Image (cartoon, grey):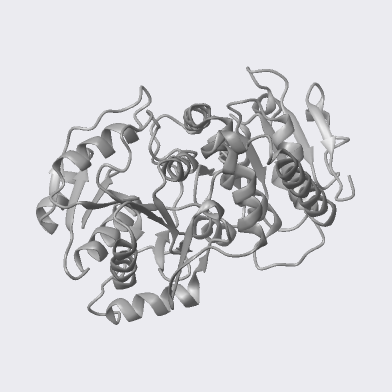
Amino acid sequence: MTIFASAKPLHGHTGVIQRNAISSWTRLHPRPEIILFGDDHGVAEVCREFSLRHIPQLAMTEFGAPLLSNLFEQAQRIASHDILCYVNSDIMLMGDFLEALRTVSKAQNRFLMVGRRWDVSIRDIWDFGCRGGENGLREFVTLHGKQAPPPGNSDYFAFTRGLWASIPPFALGRGAWDPWMIYEARRLRALVVDASPAVMTIHQTHDQSTYRHGLRRWRQEVNRNWEIVGKEAERFCLWDSTHVLTPTGLRPVRGIRYFIRRADTLHLFHPRLSAPLKIVRLAAAGVRSLREKRALAREPLLRLVKLVQSKLPADGITAILGLVGGIGPKKTGDSPGLRLANSLTWRGMPVVIYDPEPAVMEHAQRSLGGPVKFAASAEECVIDADVVVLAVSKEEFHRIPAEALAHERGPRLVIDCCDSLSTEPMLQGIQHITWVQES
């Protein structure tokens, strides 16, 4: 197998987690060929250290994101093997990954293997020798991490060379292109295997503060990716796999959810079935709508997320002030403000967060991934946001200067979940919503 990835600058925590990932790949047996693309700081040095193939040339978008099409084209052209795997450069792999790949490759000569990740915070270089090898890592992740809920996204794509004749110019690292990869593999009638039950792929949580052009540009590139994906392909996810790999073996997908998904998308691959399946598609749309209404009815946080989404401009940023208290009746391990931030970032909407308690911010840095910036003050948190969510009422938030809430892009919206700012003079000229969980 050939593993290939695009590396970010190797400094700070970003450097730590990439070194951990690369180290785990080199420990696979037999060792795969590993190709690392990019010429950012430290990439050439780490390639020499771990004896990797280094390809510094990689086409970029105008904002500096690697082009997925160029990455895959180069990798397939120069790889020494016919089975390739793109892996995000923060993902650690273990022996179960190769075992899964052996099983899938025996089933069919054209396949795509994907799977949900396990999220865990690892802040330092992982020493396999001193921490029990692969078993020690597995125990650590089981104890301190959690697997993303289904259907989730995949941070790896293992496939046979030549599966995709061409790939659109997606911006790598901005999300949204995963659905197209699954859709296109299905369109080409390849085996699409969800290996989530059998493989522990480890995502080391981090923020997007290394993105040099800022969160607004990040959001613009996400939006562009979605435009490329298109309305038909954007619905695809791991529920659209043809097979699932379990600890007991490979089997075709079964269950009502998979059946509904298959009936709802079959016309895309067999246009003649469009008319006969119309009633089934309408029924599936009704089920999705009912499921969404029920979720909104029982979860206030989802209603708040929907409100924020409706008020954000296309390239908008949300500021969240306060991470502990305030939103919804549930008492969970994660604070309400943190849950709001996680919900937004999972949807590709960047957030800036701030809490005056250092321990709370440290927990957020360990827990949150995706497009998030950690501000050093309340004023810094709100300065560039389009929507400000006051999740907790704290004195520091009441002292934000009025000019910090002024916005050159138009009136800023403040969603007050605590009903504590409605009489503050600083809110004059600012759009203001008092949000309650029943609304």
Q: Quadrant of residue 357?
A: bottom right
Image quadrant where residue 114 sits: bottom left
- Whole-percent x, y for residue 315 in the image: 58, 27
Quarter of the image with the C terminus in it: top right
Q: Nearer the viewer, residue 349 or 410?
A: 349
- How many discs appear? 0
Q: Position of residue 297 (x, y in %)?
A: 85, 52
Q: Quadrant of the N terminus?
A: bottom left
Q: Nearer the viewer, residue 119 or 319?
A: 119
- Residue 285 visible in the shown view: yes
Residue 430 against residue 210 in the figure, above or below: above
Q: In the visual, does 298 lie left or right of 9?
A: right
Task: Identify the residue shown where x is 45% and y is 40%.
Answer: 187
User: Image check: 86 left or right of 48?
Assistant: right
Residue at 14% across, 44% down = 54
Q: Position of residue 281 (x, y in %)?
A: 70, 42
Q: Position of residue 283 (x, y in %)?
A: 77, 46
In this rendering, is residue 60 above or below 99?
Answer: above
The residue lying toward the viewer, choosing from 236 and 353, is 236
State the residue at coordinates (31%, 64%): 101
Left or right relative to 360: residue 222: left
Q: Is residue 355 something one can see in this rendering?
A: no
